[in-house]
Image (cartoon, rainbow, N blue to C red):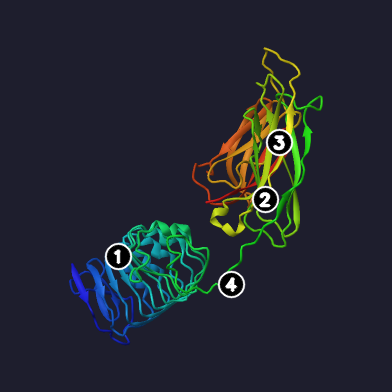
């Protein structure tokens, strides 16, 4: 293998032309020198007064393991072709005048142990692809103009022993996953995150070592005020009483009484103290709720047919935000509403009873949002051909879940977020539609990734 060390720049020569290298193999011309595509494993061009942009053709040197272009006067963006250099272990581009975004393609360089991009003028956010670089031992991104939040994928870099993110414009909260790293936090030679705009509360592992932060734009935690109204209960039975096998429908108002909109899946969690009932849905989520608004919600429960004596079931409902531990400023601490509903046994029989719904119905999937499995429930008051289909928001067919004749009854089926080719589908909003005879109904659901 040929090693090229500290070569001088030749002004005025073009980049990227095909050429024949000194060893007779095909090459590519960079900075006035022809480098073998197959045999160049190291480029040491630091402190060579290089100017202009990094040529995209550098991505042809696919066997490079060490690339040192630091301490020059390089400008422009890092070419995405840098992601072709999957054998790189050392990438030094620090102390230049590089601008723009850090390309996502750097996430392809999974053999990297040292990534030095500090002291440039990058203005992008740190992408989640940084979490792909699990072999990194040193990550230097300090002294740029990086914005946005630190991605939680930073916690994947468990081999890091040097992390430098200081002197940027990073905002938001520091993810708890940073505490998964094995770094000596109190040593400024191994960790520096100071001089950003990162907001408290800080993860416990680094709360004493975040240095100076500009918290002027940090949002203070809102004291959320959500409430649930008294329930309106309707029994789907023949005598107005909740008997074994009967369904009750419960309606209530869910209100955001705060003068601030809640933008992180507010909703209600519903629980029962009895295993003798089955809830149609244990959670009801909304994408967001405007300030001082209410939503009418409804849910149901079925009394088990095995109940042989009168009993009372206690239900509880309380406000909650979905996965708010990831966005603690949206966590809701509301009062719990409790109420009781009696189950009355009228007839005790040794013969099994079969309960048939009175009307067609398609219920909201649970859980929703989901990842990657959700259940769809539907009621069939009569035998017939049933078709249940998943569509994306462009109206394109994604998955046919059911297309067969079924008997009357309470039914359910699961969807595992795959298409008809059993390939995983992307996150987003989907429609699920049921058709049986003249009955057709659709509902929306959200797949998270």
Marks 1 & 2, CB-CB < 8 Å contact: no
177 left or right, relative to 332: left
Q: Residue at x 58, y 69 (%)?
A: 218
Where does label 1 land, which residue?
88
| x then y, percent, for residue 224 | 67, 57
Where does label 3 land, which residue?
300
| x then y, percent, for residue 234 | 79, 34
Provide the secondary structure element on which disc 4 rests: loop
Of tags 4 and 3, the one toward the viewer is 4
Q: Looking at the figure, which quarter contains the N terminus?
A: bottom left
Q: Residues within 10 Å of mark 3 (few under 14, many from 20)?
A: some
Q: Residue at x 72, y 35 (%)?
A: 361
Of tags 4 and 2, the one toward the viewer is 2
* N-terminal-most mark, 4 or 2: 4
Of tags 4 and 1, the one toward the viewer is 4
Where does label 4 land, which residue?
217
């Amino acid at each position: 293998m040929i090693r090229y060390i500290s070569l001088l720049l030749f002004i005025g020569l073009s980049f990227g032309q095909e050429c024949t290298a000194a060893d007779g193999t095909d090459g590519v011309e960079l900075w006035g020198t022809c480098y073998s595509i197959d045999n160049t494993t190291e480029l040491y061009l630091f402190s060579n007064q290089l100017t202009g942009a990094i040529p995209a053709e550098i991505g042809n040197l696919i066997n490079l393991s060490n690339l040192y272009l630091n301490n020059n006067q390089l400008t422009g963006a890092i070419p995405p072709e840098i992601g072709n250099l999957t054998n790189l272990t050392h990438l030094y581009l620090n102390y230049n005048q590089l601008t723009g975004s850090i390309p996502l393609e750097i996430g392809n360089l999974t053999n990297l142990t040292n990534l030095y991009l500090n002291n440039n003028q990058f203005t992008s956010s740190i992408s989640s692809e940084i979490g792909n670089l699990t072999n990194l031992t040193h990550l230097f991104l300090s002294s740029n103009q990086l914005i946005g939040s630190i991605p939680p994928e930073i916690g994947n870099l468990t081999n890091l022993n040097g992390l430098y993110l200081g002197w940027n414009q990073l905002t938001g909260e520091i993810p708890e996953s940073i505490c998964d790293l094995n770094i000596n936090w109190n040593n400024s030679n191994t960790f520096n995150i100071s001089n950003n705009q990162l907001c408290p509360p800080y993860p416990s592992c680094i709360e004493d070592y975040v240095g100076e932060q500009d918290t002027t734009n940090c949002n203070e935690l809102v004291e959320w005020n959500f409430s649930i109204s008294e329930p309106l209960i309707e029994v789907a039975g023949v005598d107005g009483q909740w008997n074994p096998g009967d369904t009750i429908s419960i309606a209530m108002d869910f209100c955001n009484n705060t003068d601030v909109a809640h933008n992180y899946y507010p909703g209600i969690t519903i629980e029962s103290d009895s295993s003798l009932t089955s809830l149609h849905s244990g959670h009801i989520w909304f994408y967001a709720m405007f300030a001082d608004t209410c939503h009418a919600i409804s849910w149901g429960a079925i009394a088990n047919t095995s109940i042989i004596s009168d009993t009372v079931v206690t239900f509880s409902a309380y406000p909650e935000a979905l996965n708010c531990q990831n966005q603690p400023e949206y966590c809701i601490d509301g009062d719990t509403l409790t109420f009781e509903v009696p189950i009355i046994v009228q007839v005790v029989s040794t013969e099994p009873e079969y309960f048939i719904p009175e009307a067609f119905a398609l219920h909201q999937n649970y859980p929703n949002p989901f990842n990657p499995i959700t259940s769809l429930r539907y009621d069939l008051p009569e035998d017939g051909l049933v078709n249940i289909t998943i569509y994306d928001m462009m109206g394109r067919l994604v998955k046919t879940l059911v297309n067969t004749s079924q008997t009357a009854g309470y039914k359910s089926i699961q969807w595992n977020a795959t298409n008809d080719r059993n390939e995983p589908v992307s996150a987003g909003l989907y429609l699920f539609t049921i058709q049986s005879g003249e009955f057709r109904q659709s509902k929306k659901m959200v797949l998270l990734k």
